[in-house]
Image (cartoon, grey):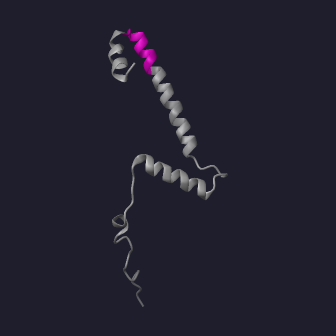
Amino acid sequence: MTLQEIIKSLDDLSIENKTFLLNLLKSQLSQNKEKEEIKSFNPDGENFREMTLRFRERMEREGIEFTDEDFANLRDRSPGKEIEM
């Protein structure tokens, strides 16, 4: 059954069943969110390499890319804070 078919079949459900389904979906989403938060949490046992690999996986999954242009003119070339003598 495709997602479109599932969505169309919702019209045939009673209000009680729609409410039950909505609560079930909320519960599932909440559990998935908690799992993702636990997964993304940095426990003390995770080392730099593991964090870097996880960061790279997430960057790839979300399609984020850095280029040299992102870092162009990033450096502050001012001489620093002016000092009064």
Image point (37%, 80%), residue name? 78
Q: Which residue reaches farthest right?
A: 45
Is 76 on the left or on the right of 35, as rendered?
Answer: left
Q: Nearer the viewer, residue 49 or 75?
A: 49
Q: Which residue reaches farthest bottom?
A: 85
Coordinates of residue 33 in the picture (x, y in percent): 50, 36
Q: Main secondary structure of the magenta part?
A: helix
- The residue stretch that appears in magenta: 13-22
If the image is split into quadrants, where does the N terminus sit?
top left
Above or below: residue 49 compared with residue 16: below
Q: Nearer the viewer, residue 84 or 4?
A: 4
Coordinates of residue 36 in the picture (x, y in percent): 53, 39
Q: Nearer the viewer, residue 12 or 68?
A: 68
Coordinates of residue 80 in the picture (x, y in percent): 41, 81
If the image is split into quadrants, where does the C terminus sit?
bottom left
Above or below: residue 74 compared with residue 6: below
Image point (42%, 10%), residue name? 16
For residue 48, which quarter of the picture? bottom right
Is 38 on the left or on the right of 3, as rendered?
Answer: right
Above or below: residue 8 compared with residue 31: above
